Image (tube, coloured by chain):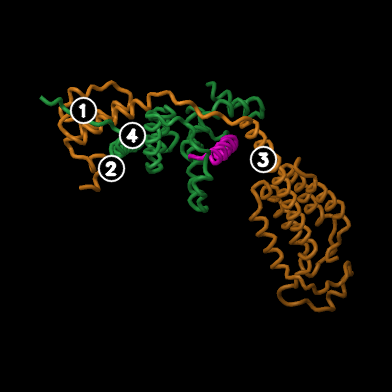
Chain colours: A orange, B green
Amino acid sequence: MSLALHPFDDSELTPPECAPTLARIQSALDGEPVDFATDAHATACPACRDRVRALAVLLGALAEPHAAEPVPAGFADRVLAALHNERPAARRSFVRYSVWAALAAALLVGAYFAFGTSRPPEGPQPPRELVKSEPEVAPAPRERPVRIGDAMAHAGQSLLDAPKPLTESVAVAPKLFDALAGPIAWPAAKPMGADVLEPARQAVLELPTAARDALEPVTGTAAKAYARFLRDLGTVKPNS
Amino acid sequence: MSADAALVTRCLDGDPAGARELVERFQTDVLAVCHRLLNNQHDAEDAAQETFARVFRSLARWDRTRPLKPWVVGIAVNRCRTAIGKRAKRPELADYLHDAPDTRPADDSAETATEIRAAVDALRSEYREVFVLFHEQNLPYEEIAEAVGRPVGTVKTWLHRARLEVLDRLRARGVVPAEPQPEPR
């Protein structure tokens, strides 16, 4: 059955009695010395007789030394120049991508501080009188048109889409969020002091190193962004 | 460390002389394969240039336990396949716009060579690749298998079929000299 045969098996197309002669033809083309004078089939079978004569023509043509194609002048120079031009382009592309990634990371953290504390409270509101009785440490929050859930989901997706180094560099971000999310619950139970800010500050301090490892020396943008962020962190008041 | 591995190490270290040496070592083979498979000088040069770009891009992934030449030739064969695929999609140029006219002398040997070349060109691409690599580039079966990414057995089968098809075409085209007739008594 033909299915049992190799798809390129010669035996499909040639009579079995020709097989030994065809094998000798292949051996001759492999460079082995073959004497067809002793091959009775090669003389008796017209097709194989023609093949053997064609073989002589082919072997003669293949044996002639054919001149190698001349290499075009300056070919190596063109290859190396193309290679040289290709590398800076790839580097520029990486720098451009890294800058955008750094900006995305900075925006993510910025978005949290800008909008994360204005989330409308869930559950019942406390009596207004109770709030008034406590010292007021920040102005009353205003309604903002931004949907923080959407913004955070978008920012989170950006992080997921970011390359691995960036993902690793902001892997410490959850620490920051954990440190901040608890104390900055609405309404603020008490003024945010050093005991609240310090863990957050520590978590934020880890970010520049991680980001620098991932993004430097490609760009100083991340370092500058985080330096400014740290500078401003001390002046941030809850719900401001 | 083999000479190939030493050369590749120099290239990976950014040594410009190493890169030039690699190009100059393989450019004749790569151009010959590309020219033979594409039958067009301009396309062959483009494919050869892309081959070296691909070689340098992938150099770190080369298996140092294997010879470098079949790996490079294999990339060249792949670039030629891609070029042939692109060529099939673009409008065909008029024949006279292809290569420069053949200026070889029209004697019998040239005619035979032309017929053999035409017979090889008429082969399906896999057969043509292995025929060119074995009979024109003189690569052994193992290196051809490496270059085309197929087992040695498959390469042998393809080559055997290619040879029979070439022989049959030469017979059909009358390239085979007439059979000597027995002397009349």
Toward which corner of the image does residue A209 lie, by quadrant? top right
Q: Is residue A237 visible?
A: yes
- Disc 1 + disc 2, Cβ < 8 Å: no
Range shown magenta: B39-57
- Mark 1, Cα crowd under 10 Å, few <14 / some 14-19 / many 20+, is few
Q: Which mark, by number, is residue A86?
A: 3
Q: Which mark, by number, is residue B180?
A: 1
Q: Which SS class for mark 2?
A: loop
Q: Which mark, by number, is residue B156?
A: 4
Q: Are marks 4 and 2 on the same chain?
A: no
- Residue displayed at 34% across by 25% down: A60
Three-letter amino acid code of the residue under disc 1: Pro
Q: Are marks 1 and 4 on the same chain?
A: yes
Left or right of residue A219: residue A132:
right
Q: CA distance from mark 1 to mark 2?
A: 38 Å
Q: Which SS class for mark 1?
A: loop
Q: Which mark, by number, is residue B32?
A: none
Q: State which mark lies toward you, 1 or 2.
A: 1
Percent x, y of residue B23: 59, 29
Q: CA distance from mark 3 to mark 4?
A: 39 Å
Q: Are marks 1 and 2 on the same chain?
A: no
Three-letter amino acid code of the residue under disc 3: Glu
Any magenta on residue A42? no
Q: Which SS class for mark 4?
A: helix
Q: Which SS class for mark 3?
A: helix
